[in-house]
């Protein structure tokens, strides 16, 4: 599509379903399988159990977290299968014994999973995900669930802060070259959940339907005999609505040349270096003087939420963010944990669940029992507390429960389009107190209360 900021392809292959996804069974830690062998021997494997995912604290300075990666977790659980190649690897390495390998050969998660819907915000202690089933089938999922949720939630939280700082201006995710190639796809997805509008990563566009954008790099200018030749070649190939990169040589001369070649219909210019605030003002003035009043300005160059906020008064129309986004803007993990919070005393399906919890020094203890969560609102409808409990739900909170059923009896029942997730996050962030959008350091924007 021509005439937009950068050159966009919004056609997606699917909206979140896996594309030729192989087994995820080895996306785990060695000790998950040795624990399995141990409980098969002890007789505890079939005890009904409840695991919960939560974080004890938010990253320093963050006011809220963002649940992201849930759709990928559902895909991973569905594809957690021990095929012949995986079993041969485990056998050859002597990871577990023959009895355990036989058990793994028929493994299918048959339990239930409840969780905060993807895109929702969370706070310290929020039971973000609850996995229920036999101990054996639930314990195997710990690493892959944490791997996905910790990465994606960290990226989405950074993206959300950047989206708040951008104040409605479009954000382009362009961090593929700054992280692992597979992590880049997941990061694009998480950034879209958090409020980014497009991505440069074609694999993310193919898999998740995220709009993709891109035009040219400095190398495109440098390979031509002159900047004029480069601009003319790009306009001939992509149309007058393209985005021309104007800081390879002299910005002022490049902007003049760009408008001369493309005319006032030039879609945008991109600035990738220098004092972005100063340069953006100068470029806007020059574009207006040349009659290109509708030509937009895109800025890139090591942006984070603070740099974006500092450009709020600048005549900038869109931001491209790479390194800081895909590394969580200084916090590459959400520090979530996966803890056993309840289990039955025997393998009898009717045996009642009993709360269990880790008790230790250093702030790493946890609260036992299967938990519900609700978000209490004030008279104006804004969140005022995250309420977490193990007993009956108070009548006033019954219609504000956060967890939804995601997997029932091993079957995924809650897949949804990524745009639905993105819209949910925008709505959830909008119901937080205004201080949630402050970039200054502070505690969680609402307290967590336990009942």
Image: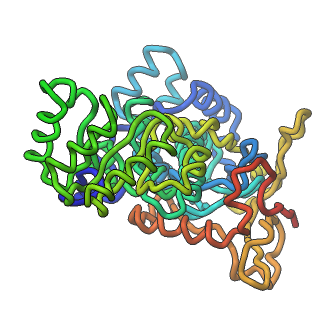
Left or right: 333 in relation to 104: right
Left or right: 48 in relation to 140: right
The location of residue 437, given as percent across then percent down, is 67, 59
Question: Dividing the image into 4 quarters, which one contains the N terminus?
Answer: bottom left
Left or right: 450 in relation to 251: right
Q: Residue furthest left?
A: 236
Visible in this render: residue 144? no
The location of residue 269, given as percent across then percent down, is 31, 47
The location of residue 154, given as percent across then percent down, is 59, 44
Q: In which quarter of the image is residue 304?
A: top right
Q: Residue furthest top?
A: 93
The image shows residue 147, relative to residue 129, as above or below, that is above
Residue in the picture at 75% in, 62% down:
371
Q: Quadrant of residue 386?
A: bottom right
The location of residue 288, given as percent across then percent down, is 33, 58
Question: Dividing the image into 4 quarters, which one contains the C terminus?
Answer: bottom right
The image shows residue 255, relative to residue 110, as above or below, that is above
């Amino acid at each position: 599509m021509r005439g937009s900021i950068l050159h966009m392809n919004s056609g997606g292959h699917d909206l979140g379903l896996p594309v030729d996804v192989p087994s995820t069974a080895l996306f785990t830690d060695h000790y998950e399988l040795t624990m399995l062998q141990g409980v098969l021997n002890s007789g505890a494997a079939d005890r009904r159990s409840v695991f919960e995912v939560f974080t004890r604290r938010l990253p320093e300075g963050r006011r809220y977290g963002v649940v992201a990666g849930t759709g990928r977790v559902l895909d991973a659980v569905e594809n957690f299968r021990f095929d012949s190649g995986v079993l041969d690897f485990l056998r050859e390495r002597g990871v577990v014994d023959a009895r355990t390998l036989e058990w793994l050969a028929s493994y299918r998660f048959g339990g239930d999973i409840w969780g905060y819907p993807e895109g929702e915000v969370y706070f310290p202690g929020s039971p973000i995900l609850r996995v229920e089933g036999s101990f054996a089938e639930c314990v195997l999922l710990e690493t892959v669930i944490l791997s996905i949720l910790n990465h994606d939630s960290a990226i989405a939280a950074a993206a959300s802060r950047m989206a708040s700082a951008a104040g409605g201006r479009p954000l382009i995710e362009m961090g593929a070259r700054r992280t692992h190639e597979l992590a880049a796809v997941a990061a694009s997805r998480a950034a879209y959940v958090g409020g980014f509008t497009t991505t440069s990563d074609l694999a993310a566009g193919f898999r998740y339907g995220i709009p993709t954008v891109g035009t040219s790099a400095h190398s495109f200018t440098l390979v031509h005999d002159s900047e004029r030749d480069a601009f003319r070649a790009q306009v001939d190939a992509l149309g007058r609505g393209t985005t021309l990169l104007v800081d390879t040589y002299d910005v002022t001369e490049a902007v003049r040349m760009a408008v001369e070649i493309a005319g006032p219909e030039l879609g945008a210019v991109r600035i990738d270096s220098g004092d972005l605030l100063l340069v953006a003002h100068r470029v806007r003035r020059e574009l207006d003087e040349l009659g290109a009043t509708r030509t937009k300005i895109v800025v890139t160059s090591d942006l984070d939420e603070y740099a974006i906020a500092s450009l709020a008064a600048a005549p900038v129309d869109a931001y491209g963010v790479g390194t800081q986004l895909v590394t969580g803007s200084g916090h590459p993990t959400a520090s979530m944990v996966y803890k056993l919070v309840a289990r039955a005393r025997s393998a009898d399906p009717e045996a009642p669940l009993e709360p269990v919890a880790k008790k230790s020094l250093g702030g790493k203890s946890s609260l036992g029992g299967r938990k519900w969560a609700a978000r209490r609102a004030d008279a104006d409808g804004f969140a005022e507390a995250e309420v977490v409990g193990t007993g009956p739900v108070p009548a006033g909170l019954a219609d504000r429960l956060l967890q939804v059923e995601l997997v029932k009896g091993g079957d995924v029942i809650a897949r949804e389009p990524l745009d639905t997730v993105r819209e949910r996050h925008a709505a959830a962030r909008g119901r937080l107190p205004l201080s949630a959008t402050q970039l200054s350091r502070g505690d969680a924007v609402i307290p967590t209360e336990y009942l």
